Image (cartoon, grey):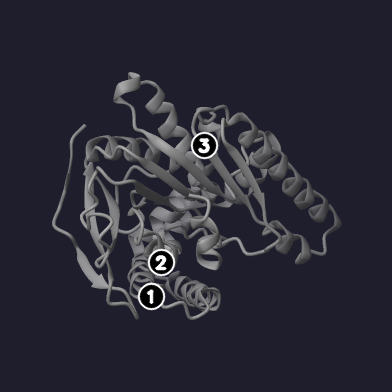
Amino acid sequence: MKSHYLIGIVTLLFSGMLNAAYKTETLILDNTRLHVTHWTNLNSDEKSSDNSPKMETVILLSGPTDNWNSDSAWFARLAPKLSRHYNVLSLDRAGQLFADKHSKLGYVEFGKHLFEALLELNLTKITFIAFASSNISLLKLTQLNETLPEDSRLHINKIVLIDPDVLTPYSISRYSKDARPFKENLVAYTKYISEGKYQQRATEKNLAELKHLRELSQDDSDTNWSYVELLFNKRLEINNIINLFAEVAIYDEDLESVKNLSFPPEIPLVIFDTNFEQSYIDNTENDQEKIDLNRWKVEARNYYQTLVNRSSKGEYIELPTKEHLLPFSQPKLIIERL
């Protein structure tokens, strides 16, 4: 499988900062386009600004929030801070940002793409920060990595997971139930979106999420609002919306595909467990739903603790915050664990 970089799409200075920049590029793997962003601190003497493979690299992988949006806009506050000390790359799954009609969608497919991309980039020291469902992609990546001779494998320093998917039968059934309308109605949804009838709703979701991000940012001058704007505008393109819905429609298949996989025990593992489920519990008046949500919340805690106990250097961090978007709300807390 061959890949190559095309000319960078855009290079911009961070809002409010004169010492940082990002560059977005297109990575082509097996005729599939991936969106890659290099985050660079221009004044740093500690590392190369072109992501030299000799330096430690942090890879940022995103997952969904309530509106199912799951691109690297969620890292627009964290990535600039990381770029002071690391080579930083964020990669977005196929079909999310390029409005391609025939992309290979899903978290499992992205795990395959990511594995091939990182092997070709020849990065020797990698730390992953994976938000929400992107743990699916990492499970696939580490499975593929284990099939290589030891001296040919990716060297993974650490994996940091933030509210990862809980891969137990009950929790998988909950996620699959949430995604079922997309699977059952995808043809109708696609027609509706293609006719432009979803545009107003998508715009409203963007505005609500932008407002939320601004509240979380606390006027942090590191936050790259130009990047948020770039990706939020991409979310409104019709083919990108169709791809988002189509990816959700196969979410249950992704979950089933990796439910029996585990991370190699020699890789240090950090898991942040926020209290975001409590918001759902507080906002429902249905007694049975409260019971079900509490079960999901407890199951998540137990599952995460099991994962870190399997790791040679595992750390479970339970947080009282109800905010799910930890990369935007508490970026320094994440950086401290690298």
Write the residue at 28% across / 56% down.
46
Q: Between 315 and 165, which is closer to the camera in this rendering? A: 315
Taking the spot 32% from the left edge, 70% from the top edge, the residue there is 230
Q: Which residue is the site of mark 2?
A: 76
Return the disc, 3 or 1, that comes first in the chain's sequence.
Answer: 1
Q: Quadrant of the N terminus?
A: top left
- Image location (x, y in percent) of residue 101: 29, 52
**In the image as oriented, which residue stretches furthest toward the left?**
7
Residue at image mark 3: 268
Kind of element beneath mark 3: loop
Q: Are marks 2 and 3 in contact (CB under 8 Å)?
A: no
How crowded pointer 1 is (Cα within 10 Å; few <14, some 14-19, many 20+) is rated as: some
Can I make out residue 250 in this image?
no
Q: Amino acid at mark 1?
A: Trp
State the residue lying farthest toward the top: 149
Q: CA distance from mark 2 to mark 1?
A: 7 Å
Name which residue type carries label 2: Ala
Instruction: Name which quarter of the figure residue 124 lies in.
Output: top left
Mark number, residue 225? 1
- Of badges 3 and 1, the one in the foreground is 3
Question: Label 3 vs label 1: CA separation?
Answer: 32 Å
| Residue sitting at the far right | 287
Residue 173, image x, y percentages = 66, 40
**Image: 222 above or below 308:** below
Mark 2 vs mark 3: which is more N-terminal? 2
Task: Identify the residue at image location x=55%, y=59%.
Answer: 333
